[in-house]
């Protein structure tokens, strides 16, 4: 199992930016970012297939959020710009061994990809308010 340690997050005004960081103890082919608000399912917002450095961003955050990796540090990032109140949620990173075929399947319904992942970070709260 891969252990994931998250950092970043916090409170920011609308229009602001935050960066989430997720450091893994071991390598996993697929890593992603998910978010959850009380009473709702955990939804996928960004996923990265690390061997090819290809990624997919959910339409709800496309153009504002960027997922990236630092292979040398085994670290995943989520750069969040132009934050909106509706981005307020608990954010989680996740990791799982996968193939490119798995990745292609996940991005067809990124919002429901959480069931594929078994290794999760502890979560970090992001609050967007004025």
Image: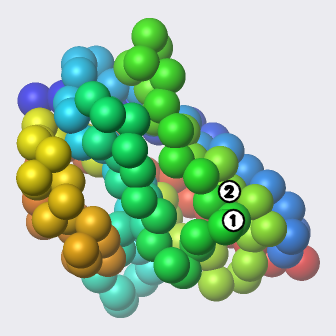
Residue 109 rendering spot, x and y as whole percentages: 25, 77
Does 42 sit above or below residue 29? Answer: below
Q: Which mark is residue 64?
A: 1
Visible in this render: residue 27? yes
Report the residue at 62% width, 60% height from top. Answer: 65
Question: For the residues marked 2 and 1, what is the alpha-carbon distance in whole angstroms?
Answer: 6 Å
Report the residue at 34% width, 87% height from top. Answer: 40
Horizontally, is 7 left or right of 112 in the view? right
Q: Nearer the viewer, residue 8 or 60?
A: 60
Query: Regarding mark 2 in the picture, which secondary structure is present there?
Result: strand
Q: Residues within 10 Å of mark 1 (few under 14, many from 20)?
A: some
Q: Which mark is residue 116?
A: none
Q: Quadrant of the N terminus?
A: top left
Query: Regarding mark 1 in the picture, which secondary structure is present there?
Result: loop
Looking at the rendering, which quadrant does residue 21 occupy?
top right
Horizontally, is 2 left or right of 10 in the view? left
Does 43 sit above or below residue 73? Answer: below
Horizontally, is 110 left or right of 15 in the view? left
Report the residue at 21% width, 30% height from top. Answer: 28
Numbered label tally: 2
Residue under pointer 2: 80
């Amino acid at each position: 199992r891969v252990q994931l340690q998250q950092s970043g997050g916090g409170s920011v005004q609308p229009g602001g930016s935050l960066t989430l960081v997720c450091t893994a103890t071991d390598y996993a082919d697929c890593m992603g970012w998910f978010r959850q608000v009380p009473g709702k399912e955990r939804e996928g917002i960004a996923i990265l297939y690390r061997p090819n450095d290809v990624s997919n961003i959910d339409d709800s955050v496309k153009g504002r959020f960027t997922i990236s990796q630092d292979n040398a540090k085994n670290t995943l990032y989520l750069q969040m710009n132009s934050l909106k109140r509706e981005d307020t949620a608990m954010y989680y990173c996740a990791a799982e061994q996968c193939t490119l075929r798995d990745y292609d399947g996940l991005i067809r319904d990124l919002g429901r990809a959480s069931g594929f992942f078994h290794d999760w970070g502890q979560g970090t709260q992001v609050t967007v308010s004025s």
